[in-house]
């Protein structure tokens, strides 16, 4: 990672006449830009016809960057095959679940399992890498762009064959597959591998095991495309790190844990969702996720927006100061690079209404002033680069569980595992407690408290991991409808939640989804969900009017395992989370009023930076532990050095 904070955005000079480029680079310098991502969507210009390459213009782009001391995240342009590709190889275009073959004309027009796509993608990547491997401007390979953003699952015959090959490598026999998928139900038993299809349109609910394995296969297919490019780049340019921009926290089609494990440095994109009441808390979730995916090391924010995006129903422009708060929050949560989509707002094309660092209106604008001010500020904060964020709390999250719960035949449509994880994260955010995200089978030894908001599916190893964590003195809080099925989406029998019945000291005999709120003895309120549960060793801390348990606590080894049988409303959840935070001995980062976000980054040598982000319209006083009170003006961000 750089010893400065990387600052910049996607630069797409090919959208502009060459006369503009010098001006672009001069303005980049004015804005403090030291890094741009180039070449992301350049395939049709770099290879205008199959096998015909034109790198002349791109040489000039790279040279211009080098001359001006700006480094490049050099992209392989494989996210957008040119029209000639779809024209020559229509069989390589993606097919949806209804059997519709899509056409070129936007981007990501390829089937992830297509051998011809892979061949052509590797060829352009090889040309690019061979040409620029020693270029002074090259800092990082930006492989592809947002794998699976639009074509995460392809249902064509090529994908079907690849799916079958994947299944054969995962199951010892067809019998094992039939058993895992429960194909005795609805007469789905396969007598030949060749009968197995992707879960294409079918009269009613598809087989859950088939659906889940297809999601796993599809994620693996994309990761394999990444590793194929990465390995080629490594061979040609050993020592140049590679990444691809994930959409951590926003898109759940790729297994981010598995993907991140293949990267030299994790990078991700994040966009505010205008419809959310407090989108900056969602931002914090995404940033915490990215940091956790990179094992706590500094990561790279590859894209966010200076103001509005163009793909939501109403694309709200950012308020004055919001850009700075957003960017510095990513920095506070461990990013060593702050980048945007894109450098110069497009004049034409599908994203011409998307904000950029340099807006249509030019430099006499709020955006430009904020962009240049932030560039100067990040230069002053260079010392932060390389420091890390530490957390005593982890939230467990797993893509397989999200995918399994995505099957349509569930007890209630109101149990959204991603939103629930975000809601629990938001409760910690409001309590000023920093947390990581962790894979259920990941290393939990450094944490005091582990939250399991919604983990419907957990493997045996994941189940044992949590029990071990508690046994060794940790505190866990498990949410309802967690630990229900095994890794094949088969119910764990004998009373829910089968994975953690002993750990929690509770046995559930039936789910009882709700239409409205339900009052608990404590005065708190449950929503959407309740369970007919029996304490089997656990102490009951709150109940329904029937006297049945709503919140329980079980002693297990040296620790405690709490369980909620309902989805508490925000206030009730905040109280329970405050209780387990206290029980685990976890402290907030600093004393701060509501709406003020406080996060600390530290170097191993003790230098540390307390970021205080005031999201409110009032001045606020933050009291760092053992430090003097600091006033953070309304909407301002303060970095307190220690
Ligand atoms: C990202 C993508 C960019 C641009 C941006 C718009 O998903 O990587 O190329 O489309 O969204 O918000």
Image (spheres, helix red, strand yellow):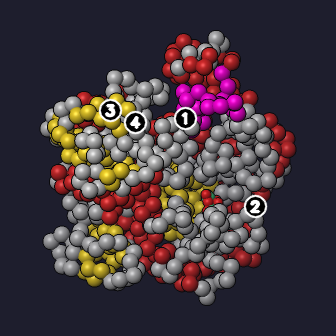
- Magenta-colored stretch includes residue 43: no
Q: Quadrant of the N terminus?
A: bottom left
Identify the mark nearer the N-term, 2 or 1.
2
Q: Is residue 618 left or right of residue 48?
A: left
Residue at the far front: name it: 546
- Earlier residue among tags 4 and 2: 2
x and y percent of residue 116 in the render? 75, 36
Q: Nearer the viewer, residue 81 or 139?
A: 81
Quarter-wise, where is residue 505 in the image?
A: top left
* Res. 18 image quadrant: bottom right
Q: What distance separates the C-alpha of mark 3 from that of mark 1?
A: 20 Å
What residue would you read off at disc 3? 508
- Picture quarter containing residue 619? bottom left
Query: Which residue is tagged 1?
Result: 409
Q: Can the viewer see residue 443 in this picture?
A: yes
- Kindly report the distance in space between the C-alpha atoms of the residues bearing marks 4 and 1: 14 Å
Residue at 56% from the left image edge and 84% from the top image edge: 366
| Residue 537 x/y as whole percent | 18, 32
Observer-nearest of 533 and 207: 533
Q: Residues within 10 Å of mark 2 (few under 14, many from 20)?
A: few
Q: Quadrant of the C terminus?
A: bottom left
Residue receiving disc 4: 511
Is residue 137 visible in the rendered image? The answer is no
Q: Which residue is mark 2?
A: 56
Figure quadrant, ligand 1: bottom right
Spatial separation of the CA atoms under disc 2 and disc 3:
67 Å
Q: Secondary structure at mark 2?
A: helix
């Amino acid at each position: 990672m750089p010893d400065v904070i990387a600052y910049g955005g996607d630069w797409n000079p090919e959208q502009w006449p060459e006369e503009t480029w010098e001006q672009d680079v001069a303005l980049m310098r004015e804005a403090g830009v030291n890094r741009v991502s180039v070449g992301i969507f350049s395939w049709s210009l770099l290879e205008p016809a199959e096998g015909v390459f034109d790198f002349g213009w791109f040489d000039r782009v790279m040279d211009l960057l080098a001359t001006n001391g700006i480094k490049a995240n050099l992209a392989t342009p494989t996210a957008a095959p040119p029209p000639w590709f779809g024209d020559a190889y229509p069989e390589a275009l993606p097919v949806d679940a209804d059997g519709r073959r899509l056409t070129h004309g936007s981007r990501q027009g390829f089937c992830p399992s297509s051998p011809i796509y892979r061949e052509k993608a590797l060829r352009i990547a090889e040309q690019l890498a061979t040409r620029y491997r020693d270029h002074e401007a090259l800092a990082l390979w930006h492989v592809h762009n947002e794998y699976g953003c639009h074509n995460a699952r392809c249902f064509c015959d090529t994908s079907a064959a690849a799916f079958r090959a994947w299944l054969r490598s995962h199951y010892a026999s067809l019998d094992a597959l039939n058993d895992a998928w429960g194909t005795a139900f609805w007469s789905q038993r396969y007598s030949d591998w060749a009968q197995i299809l992707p879960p294409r349109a079918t009269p009613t609910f598809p087989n859950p095991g088939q659906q889940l394995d297809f999601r796993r296969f599809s994620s693996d297919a994309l990761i394999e495309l990444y590793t194929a490019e990465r390995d080629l780049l490594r061979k040609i340019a050993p020592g140049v790190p590679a990444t691809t921009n994930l959409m951590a926290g926003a898109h759940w089609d790729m297994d981010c844990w598995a993907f991140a494990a293949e990267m030299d440095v994790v990078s991700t994109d994040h966009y505010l969702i205008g419809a959310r009441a407090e989108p900056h808390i969602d931002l914090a979730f995404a940033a915490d996720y990215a940091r956790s995916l990179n094992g706590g090391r500094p990561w790279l924010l590859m894209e966010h927006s200076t103001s509005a995006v163009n793909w939501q129903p109403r694309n709200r422009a950012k308020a004055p100061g919001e850009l700075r708060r957003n960017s510095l929050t990513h920095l506070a949560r461990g990013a060593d690079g702050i980048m945007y989509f894109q450098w110069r707002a497009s004049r034409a094309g599908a994203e011409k209404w998307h904000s950029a660092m340099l807006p249509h209106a030019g430099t006499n604008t709020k955006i430009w002033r904020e962009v240049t001010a932030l560039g100067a500020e990040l230069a002053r904060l260079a010392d932060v680069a390389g420091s890390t964020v530490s957390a005593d709390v982890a939230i467990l999250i797993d893509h397989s569980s999200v995918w399994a719960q995505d099957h349509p035949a569930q007890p209630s449509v109101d149990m959204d595992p991603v939103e629930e994880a975000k809601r629990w994260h938001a409760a910690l955010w409001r309590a000023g407690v920093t947390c990581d995200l962790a894979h259920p089978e990941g290393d939990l030894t450094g944490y005091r408290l582990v939250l399991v908001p919604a983990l419907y599916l957990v493997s045996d190893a994941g189940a044992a991991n949590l029990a071990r964590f508690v046994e060794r003195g940790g505190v866990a809080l498990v949410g309802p409808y967690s630990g229900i099925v095994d890794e094949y989406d088969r119910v764990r029998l004998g009373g829910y939640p089968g994975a953690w019945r002993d750990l929690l000291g509770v046995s559930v005999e039936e789910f009882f989804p709700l239409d409205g709120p339900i009052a608990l003895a404590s005065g708190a309120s449950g929503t959407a969900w309740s369970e007919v549960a029996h304490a089997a060793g656990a102490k009951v801390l709150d109940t329904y009017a029937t006297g049945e348990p709503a919140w329980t606590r079980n002693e297990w080894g040296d620790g405690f395992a709490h369980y909620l049988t309902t989805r508490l409303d925000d206030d009730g959840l905040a109280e329970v989370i405050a209780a387990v935070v206290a029980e685990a001995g976890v402290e907030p980062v600093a004393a701060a009023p509501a709406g003020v976000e406080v996060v600390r980054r530290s170097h191993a040598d003790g230098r540390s930076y307390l970021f205080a982000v005031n999201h409110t319209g009032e001045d606020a006083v933050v009291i760092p532990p053992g430090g003097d009170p600091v006033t953070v003006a309304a909407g301002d961000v303060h970095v307190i050095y220690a």
